[in-house]
Amino acid sequence: MHRILVTAGAALIGLSVAGCVQQPAKPSDCGEPSVKRNATLTSDGLDPRNIDVCRGQQLQLTVKIQADGVLHIHGYDAQAKEVRVGQTITFDFTAVRSGQFVIELHMQAQPNGLNMGVLTVHEP
């Protein structure tokens, strides 16, 4: 009986804590088949830091580049692009996986990569 009460108590605490975590809101254009997002990449990060789309949407992400390196989105690594200051590049792909994906820049001084932002792909 004690084991059942402990298990039930742990489950209730887990539900209480989960209810307190704020879930990110879906983008208002979640029902659209394709979306465009714009960002600027500096050596400090991506602005805006978070890019939100919904699963199944065709994403066109245009990025103004203010740092040299190789830019890629984890989970969508086929989209890796070598970038140079002054360029504007476009990632164009369908967001087929939901979740959060780090947008990373590999610079000569930081070959392991720096977390520049996050692509969040919401469930529609």
Image (spheres, rainbow, N blue to C red):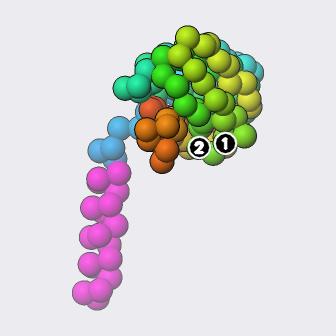
Percent across and percent down for residue 84 are 57, 20
Looking at the image, how many numbered discs can be counted on the residues? Answer: 2
Furthest residue toward front: 108
Residue 3 lies in the magenta stretch: yes
Asked whether, in this view, residue 49 is left or right of residue 64, the answer is left
Give the magenta-colored segment's residue range: 1-18
Instruction: Look at the picture and state if 115 lies above or below 59.
Output: below
> Label 2: few (<14), some or many (≥20) within 10 Å?
some
Please name the residue shown 35% across and 38% down the image. 22
Q: Residue at x 62, y 13 (%)?
A: 88
**What type is the residue that disc 2 sits on?**
His
Are discs 1 and 2 less than 8 Å apart at CB? yes
Question: Looking at the picture, how far across and down is residue 113, in whole percent?
Answer: 48, 42
Crowdedness of circle 1 by 10 Å Cα count: few (<14), some, many (20+)? few
Identify residue for label 2: 74
- The amino acid marked with disc number 1 is Asp
Q: Quadrant of the N terminus?
A: bottom left
Left-right relation of 5 to 106:
left
Q: Is residue 92 visible?
A: yes
Q: Is residue 9 above or below residue 72?
A: below
Percent coordinates x, y for residue 119 in the rendering: 54, 33
Please name the residue that numbered disc 1 is placed on. 77
- Residue 114: assigned label: none
Residue 91: quadrant of the picture = top right
Q: Nearer the viewer, residue 33 or 50?
A: 50
Prevalent SS, magenta region = helix
Q: From mark 1 to mark 2, how far is it between C-alphas?
A: 5 Å
Give the residue at x 29% y 54%. 16
Q: Secondary structure at mark 1?
A: helix
